[in-house]
Image (cartoon, rainbow, N blue to C red):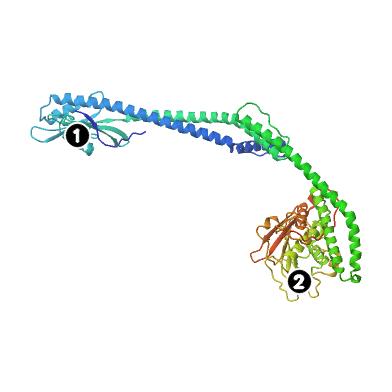
Amino acid sequence: MRERATGGATTDDGPGGGTGSAGAPAAGRRVLRMLGRASGLLRWTSLRLRLVVVFALVALTAAVSASGIAYWLNRNTVLDRTQNAVLKDFRKSLEDSTRSLPLRPRCTELQDAARQMAGGPQNYAVLLIGVDREGKDCAATTHKDLLTLKNVPTSLRSAVDEVRPVDDSNRYSHHLYWQRKQVGDSPYLVAGAKVIGGGPTGYMMKSLATERQDLNSLAWSLGIATALALVGSALLAQAAATTVLRPVQRLGHAARQLGEGRLDTRLRVTGTDELADLSRTFNRTAERLEQRVEELSGREAASRRFVADMSHELRTPLTAITAVSEVLEEEADSLDPMIAPAVQLVVSETRRLNDLVENLMEVTRFDAGTARLVLDEVDVADQVTACIDARAWLDAVELDADRGTVARLDPRRLDVILANLIGNALKHGGSPVRVSVRTEGVAGDDAGGSTAVGGGGAGAPAGPEADGGPAGGAGDGGPERSGWTADAEQSGWTEDAERPGSGTLVIRVRDHGPGIPEEVLPHVFDRFYKASASRPRSEGSGLGLSIALENAHIHGGEITAANLPEGGAVFTLRLPMDASPLAGGDRRDGGPQGPAGEGTEGGR
């Protein structure tokens, strides 16, 4: 008999508390400790954590792979050893027990032979099947509940009963076959063979519960070893990360100091590894950056001094030229008609040059940090109306502003901002220019009355427009103040006017022109920027919008420009309702105040 395995399936199991006022210092220290722990946890969400996780994953993968291979090898070794021992004993017992049996034994003789086979050291159940002298089938089993012919797999019975041709490669017509089978929760080894030359067919069933228990113990041991390896790898990763990341943390701290402006920051370099080379590179970069910044700072300071000195030097001759040009302008009617156009050109260019010098001086003050705020409580509607009225823009501007909106701002600088925005809209956009004033984040905001200034005529619409401002009527071309009293016009605001406080003042200036080209939009606040590459001659200096933006910044505000879908451009000014915190801040105050210009530059 030769052992062969059939293709059967193998199944082997494998607290918190509070403190009172008396314990405030202790509570403070406890809070600081908690914050320290929280910051430590946050630091773990960095490269250190990733290194630990990678180490742990690699160790886990290696440990699981090694444990899996070890379990598989030990499993096969245990099962093969048990299986070979059982099959060898079964084959020998079957040969010895059936050798003395007649060709057609009685059932009692088969039963005795089965008990003799089952009484061996392997402790397996035996089933013998034969034909008695009367030609009847006889089945003798040592365990009726466990091993019967019905419990033997059909594939195993077919393989055992199969008669194979005998030739040079196959010396026996029958072979020993085995298969593993699950009965309930226990694994069993089932084997069968037929006695060659006639005789009974024998089957045996051996429990593998002991082997499964041994394999389960091995699996637990390997699992514990894997967990210990994982913990060890995490500790090793933590130690390695600490060694590697300490220089990286020092480098990061130095980089942050460098970013904060401390250009003299340097790292102490030790060793010759890659991190030491990185520290040397950082030191060289910081040194070159410090030299470059010092060089650029010197050039910038020299440039500022040059512009400031030039502006001051130009003021004296420019004052004389301005006086002469004003005299010539007054006598223009008595001049020769051939000379009058030249005189008008001189007058206009002198004014333009004077505005340019004043703007340059204002820019110089901003660059030097000497610009200061002179705050006062300003009724915004009054301020906008005064700006429009002083420049004779009443017929071209529509104003929508709530009466009594009071903000604590610098009125001169607010006038400069408004003059530049409105003048720029009139010059480069299309009439009517609409100015709307709103507040955000102020308690008690409501849709109050509005102030309309000129531009729309008696029949101009009064409903809300795209920029938030209705067009108001102006019967005589002067300002029409809805709901204003004579006393209010004298005092500046009524008793129920909003006092400055928290919140944001939002002023939008919208025109009806073609809008700002998309490629120009990011540069409208740049100094001396012109939309055309050829820099065509214009009445402005190219500094108006940049000065307006600087004046907004000194208030802690901002100006943005955008195009509306329905056409036209809109400039949005946002200022705090109370700029007092900035007036006494860290700005270097005390610079001279320039006049309130009405520049309309900004190159579209």
Q: Secondary structure at mark 1?
A: helix
Toward which corner of the image does residue 505 lie, by quadrant?
bottom right
- Residue 587 shows in the view: no
Give the residue number, with chain letter if any, for mark 2.
Answer: 455
Q: Residue furthest left?
A: 134
Above or below: residue 6 compared with residue 461: above
Q: Is residue 269 left or right of 73 when viewed as pictured?
A: right
Q: Quadrant of the C terminus?
A: bottom right
Question: In the image shown, does 237 or 348 lie closer to the viewer?
Answer: 348
Judge from the rendering whether residue 159 lies leftward or rightward of residue 225; answer left or right. Answer: left
Residue 307 image position (x, y, % from top left)? 82, 49
Q: CA distance from mark 1 to mark 2?
A: 112 Å
Q: At numbered mark 2, what does the secondary structure look like: helix, strand or loop?
A: loop
Q: Mark 1 = which residue?
A: 160
Say which amino acid is labelled 1: Val
Mark on residue 369? Answer: none
